[in-house]
Amino acid sequence: MKELNADEKKYLLGSIREVRDFPKPGILFRDITTLIGDGKALDFLISHLEERYKDSNLNYIVGIESRGFILGAALAARLKIGFVPIRKPHKLPYTTVSQKYSLEYGFDEVEIHIDAFGDKDGARVLLIDDLIATGGTAVAASELIASLGANLVEICFLLNLKELGGEKKLAQKYKVYSVLEA
């Protein structure tokens, strides 16, 4: 599957704003609103992902709330397949299944509709989000997908924050692709 060259990666990285000390002191926040606000950069990214996944015989793109919705829905539209959201608790209107996961100081939870993949047992699914840090949310989302009988083909992130180790954790069990690393 296609990957970007060094110049293409530099171009996309340059379209992501870095915000120091957000949401708290010591954190360097990668703000992708500058990338998605730049029509040329967004089209370049989605075209790259379309090229990478067009022959993967996917049935659904699953996006993690909230920035995974932006990338996932755009890619699903390009591939002409369905989009499925994974959300925080009590945001989906129909019957859901949920998965709790650990945070540094506590727990969080994500949910998916129980019928997210219709009656398609073994649906081929791509999970996408904007970035991978420690991996807790992505692991929980992957477990939700598996619990519904779908086949998780790959997990895709725009940006891998390597020093936090989430991608390594996920790669022990799943195929993982990160467009960029920081």
Image (cartoon, rainbow, N blue to C red):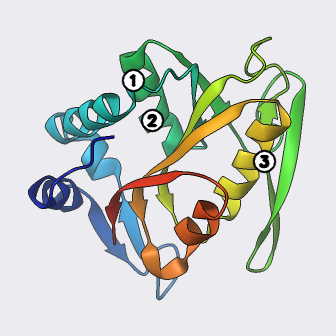
Give the residue at mark 3: 143
Q: Secondary structure at mark 2?
A: helix
Kindly identify the residue that appears in the image at 15 percent across and 55 percent down: 5
**Measuring 54% from the left and 43% from the top, which residue is drawn there?**
154
Q: Percent position (x, y) of residue 136?
A: 69, 64
Label 3: which secondary element:
helix
Inspect this view and state whether residue 36 appears: yes
Task: Give the distance between the C-alpha atoms of the residues marked 1 and 3, in whole angstroms.
Answer: 25 Å
Amino acid bearing label 2: Ile
Residue 157, compared with residue 42, is above or below; it is below
* Mark 3 residue type: Glu
Q: Which residue is mark 2?
A: 70
**Residue 55's disc number:** 1
Instruction: List x then y, in percent, for residue 101.
Output: 81, 62
Quadrant hosting residue 108: bottom right
Q: Nearer the viewer, mark 3 or mark 2?
A: 3
Residue at the image position 60 percent from the left and 71 percent from the top: 134
Q: Are marks 1 and 3 in contact (CB under 8 Å)?
A: no
* Nearer to us: label 2 or label 1: 1
Report the quarter where the N terminus lies.
top left
